[in-house]
Image (tube, grey):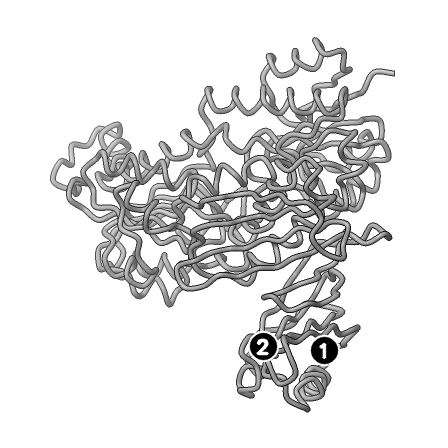
Amino acid sequence: MAPKVLISDKLSDAAIQIFKDRGIEVDFRPELGKDKDALAAVIGNYDGLAIRSATKVTPSLLEHAANLKVVGRAGIGTDNVDKEAASKKGVIVMNTPFGNMITTAEHAIALMFAVARQIPAADASTQAGKWEKSRFMGVELTGKTLGVIGAGNIGGIVCNRAVGLKMKVVAFDPFLSEEKAEQMHVEKVELDDLLKRADFITLHVPLTDGTRNILSAQNLAKTKKGVRIINCARGGLVDEAALAELIKSGHVAGAAFDVFSEEPATENPLFGLPNVVCTPHLGASTSEAQENVALQVADQMANYLLTGAVENALNMPSVTAEEAKVMGPWIKLAGHLGNFIGQMTDEPIKAINVLYDGQAATMNLEALNCSAIAGIMKSISPEVNMVSAPVIAKERGIRISTTSQEQAGVFEGYIKITMVTDTRERSIAGTVFSDGKPRFIQIKGINIDAEVGGHMLYTTNNDVPGIIGKLGTMLGDHKVNLANFTLGRSAQGGEAIAIAYLDEAIGADVITALKDTGLFQQVKPLEFDVA
């Protein structure tokens, strides 16, 4: 029986034809994207669901999706897809990460021009029969300082365009190396420095716990008087109410927003303010970008449904069906090792080396490498996948090397990741036991046997009596339930590490309390996807 795909948002005729040409039965019903009940009533009949941003793939919808195998998002953002619920359901989530980068970057530049010269208001005034030439005094971009928050794929293109406009570009991106910044002709700075210096600020970061409200009321107050702010990235990055007050006070000269904290945005604190330009999430809305991502998602979904090939998956490694049977646990291990070391790092990465020993060295190292790099990069971009991770790492100037060796220890095979920054070198190793479960076997050269847990607390300390008891007591005092412990040390009286397995994510107050004791060199909560 031929696979069936439902398209619940608008896709091009050419994309629909791809499914048909590949022998896939396809139903084009874009009205379902905004009717969750009607969508839930029919989703059980389909193997694939092709969407844009209107359709919401929720746990409730997935409960009705008995036959669903893949969700394909024509575009990069997957905020409308519950990826954890999809993973638990065994549904692959794909996106098209590179189809609309140029379009979104160009929209940010267009909005910068619009807010600099008050173009929308001047257009409305002129078409209303007025001739208010003196009212609309703008500013030039040439010679101005542009602050770019996030210099990855889209942000990097904006930097390039701005340099061409003879702007001085400063960029805040913890994972942008000095070498890469120099190649881009931008100055790498800290956020506070950017806020003080920038005449224009544009945001190009994903919405994560670390970036939410990155332009908070406190940070907005640090900006240069007369600054103009552009957001074509994600709603929730800017405190819109605080920004509105600063526009009213005259501290901020203008703003241009394509994304909002709540969408569709039928009301917002920014609406109606002078020199505020708003567009309805048009960043990817060009005919070229829409066609590119539509064709790409149709091709990817068809490949998976017909051959099992996985491309641009956000919740599954990109390997063949045959390789997945053997490599699945090792791919998970590589991702967990990368995620561990990535979460431990808060400075630019210069180099990554992945060592494959024994059995691991005989596998598809490209897939394992991609999984390891994706694990590392997830700490800065949660939507990164095995396909896009190496590209992003390369763009950030990160040197990646691979070493293979015959079995050299007690394990049949293992993977060891070493990451180098300007100030330190970190390493972690792991293997897959006979039960198919990944294990951490060495951290910082200290041998350990640690399973991967959803919520873990990593600490280091001097090996003296009473430390672990104190840790357990303090966790209990803060109502944190301790499920298990794993310990390791370099030598008696030397450096010791502890991994605590917790029932839920630990709060910042607990971390602060542990650090304030002075007993621990490091206290780091770690989160892993163990679904």
Q: Amino acid at mark 1?
A: Val
Q: Nearer the viewer, residue 351 or 510?
A: 351
Residue lying furthest left in this view? 134
Mark 1–mark 2 contact, CB under 8 Å? Answer: no
Q: Work out whether residue 239 can be spotted.
A: no
- Whether residue 163 sits left or right of residue 56 in the image: it is left
Vertical placement of residue 241 versus 287, above or below? below
- 144 sits to left or right of 427: left
Indicate the secondary structure of the residue bearing disc 2.
Answer: helix
Which residue is denoted by mark 1 in the rendering?
480
User: Is residue 115 or residue 49 the one in the foreground?
Assistant: 49
| Residue 217 found in image quarter | bottom left
**Residue at left offset 62%, top offset 53%:** 416
The image position of residue 60, as x and y in percent, is 78, 45
Q: Visible in this render: residue 324?
A: yes
Q: Nearer the viewer, residue 199 or 523?
A: 523
